Image (spheres, rainbow, N blue to C red):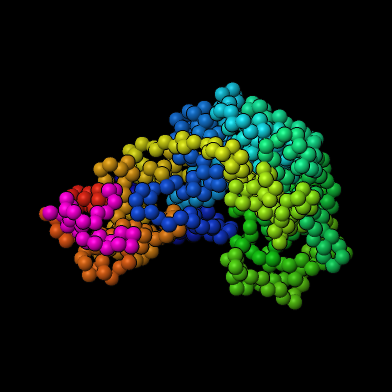
Amino acid sequence: MGVKPFSGIDVAALKKTALAARTDRHHVKPAKLPGSRKSEETVPILNCFIAPCEEGCPIHQDVATYMLLAGEGKYEEAMRVIQERNALPFITGTICSHPCMSRCTRNFYEMPVQIRDTKLVCAQNAYEKALKGLCATGSCGVKAAVVGGGPAGMAAAYYLAKAGAEVSLYEKRDRLGGVVSAIIPDFRIDDSVIAKDASFLTKLGVHIFCNTEIKSVGELKKEGFDAVVLAVGAYQRSSLTLEGKTAVNALDFLEEFNAKKGQVDLGKQVVVIGGGNTAMDTARAAKRCSGVGHVYLVYRRTKRYMPADEHELLLALEDGVEFRELLAPLRIADGKLVCHVTALGEADASGRAGVVETDELVEIPADTVIAAVGEKVPTGFYEENGIAVDSRGRARVNERLETSVPGVYVVGDGLYGPSIVVKGMAQAKQAAEAIVGAEISGDVAVDAPKEGIRAKKGVLAEPEKLPDSARCLSCRTVCENCVDVCPNRANVSVKVPGFDMAQIIHVDYLCNECGNCKSFCPYASAPYLGKFTLFACEQDMKESKNDGFTVLNLQPLSCRVRLFGSEYVWTKGSPGQQPAEGMCALIEAVCRDYAYLI
């Protein structure tokens, strides 16, 4: 069947394979340490299937549903699902750092499902119909002002208007978008993309006032606004001074880069200090400036500890940015950046390796030094408006994101400092729901057909080989990671009458506690410890702390049960302590339909 008979080792082919493995991304370690793919929740006893992508998304997009619809070419329906929770489908479809994809189960196979790209495809294909069909869901009788037209402010205006509020949005620049428009380089996103998201606000009746800077919250309150949402961003620029000389601020440079369409004079040698996404944008933008020969990115740790998203880091490498790791800037002198060589030390509280400076010095040629060292929240603005701040100058807010001034809320980068767009959107939604006193987004998720989901797990396919809808594993319908990875089959999927979702039980006597299920479970726990457990006998149950049961007799069915801190003997149909109805059904299903386990 096309297989050549063995005639000896092909040394040339073996060498070729070995060389290819050095660059094949399936064999090369990632540029960054991967983050945790687990949620913060512990695995529940029943109904544990979740879609990690949806849990990882701050606004909890119904990803599996719109992936399914997109795969069927139903872009209008998919867009309705997206817009139920997502105020900015074009912006997030273009530059979102996609925490959903970092959690995707496909990461265990090859590449994650391209969720962000699919969202943008839906938005592009359904834009006109989505715009025409968008309308408020009612009238809540609230008059609200939103200060700041960046992503968080745009999102707040969207959610409020969608709930039927009368909304006015104030932006001090001449257009909406905030840092996305003014700071993020236009080779990543341009104003035409942002304008489409802005058009949704206009369709919902939001009154947009650009070139309007609001300095007094009190004045807005006097105008009759019931609530004010401050989405002013972390606009206080930081600076880095090195022995008397101050580096160029990265945001100042990026704003000039966009305003001048890249015509910024930086000289031939440029050094960017920092390791976050802003540093990557800065370095990539600098590479595009006329006359620039080399762009060096200096960081005191290694790439693996940089806070930038791996995708952004890899784009910088592809653009030719030269990474200079383990260097701590000391001074700028005579066209050079002088740095201490550093070494990695013990891990700090964040889990990253600590940094130890050595006496060794390194010089890097530098006509321009740009520092991407983070920005600060506008403490002065808050204090001037009577808003209480904490020891770090951040506005004090309650669980509703309301400040010490009643009816005034803070969202976005101006709350806790620079973060990702979708987190600001989640805060905007939280504040909007507090203002209108009701949930704004409904649950429009639909489970995928179960047929064929398990078969997908056996198909290894890169995004270009199969449509992403065909690669999506529909984890909220069928997860079973713990079942798939258990070498002893100690985790079993049980069909229980009355439940749409299969239930997982753990079989104690088959488990050798290898920990595979802990590694692959999307919850922050281990199924072999957290799932309802079948014990072979009472002695095994006594030696374990797991909730579970052991069968004492099949006819009539009698079991010793431990559940939620209580332990008792349960006999079907007899009086006495009873497990919850769902647990009874699970125990009965195991004893009736999976008796080979007993």
Q: Residue at x 78, y 56 (%)?
A: 238
- Using the image, determine if residue 287 lies above or below residue 240: above
Q: Which residue is drawn at 60% across and 68% down?
A: 349
Q: Residue at x 41, y 45 (%)?
A: 475
Residue 80 in the magenta stretch? The answer is no
Q: In which quarter of the image is the C terminus?
A: bottom left
Total numbered badges shown on the rendered structure? 0
Residue furthest to the bottom: 359
Which of the two residues, 77 or 391, is positioned nearer the viewer here?
391
**Image coordinates for residue 316, horizontal then vertical, percent:** 67, 51
Quadrant housing residue 334? bottom right
Is 25 left, or right, of 411 in this rendering?
A: left
Residue 578 in the magenta stretch? The answer is yes
Extent of the magenta region: 556-582
Which of the two residues, 549 or 421, is positioned nearer the viewer here?
549
- Using the image, determine if residue 544 lies above or below residue 185: below
**Image coordinates for residue 535, horizontal then vertical, percent:** 24, 63
Which of the two residues, 201 or 346, is positioned nearer the viewer here?
201
- Using the image, determine if residue 425 lies above or below residue 345: above
Residue 67 can be seen in this image: no
**Image coordinates for residue 389, horizontal then vertical, percent:** 71, 56
Is 99 left, or right, of 91 in this rendering?
A: left
Which of the two residues, 232 or 53, is positioned nearer the viewer here?
232
**Image coordinates for residue 31, horizontal then vertical, percent:** 58, 58
Is 465 left, or right, of 221 in this rendering?
A: left
Q: Which residue is drawn at 80% across and 58% down?
A: 239
Quadrant housing residue 148? top right
Is 109 left, or right, of 580 in this rendering?
A: right
Residue 345 can be seen in this image: yes
Residue furthest to the left: 555
Q: Quadrant of the N terminus?
A: top left
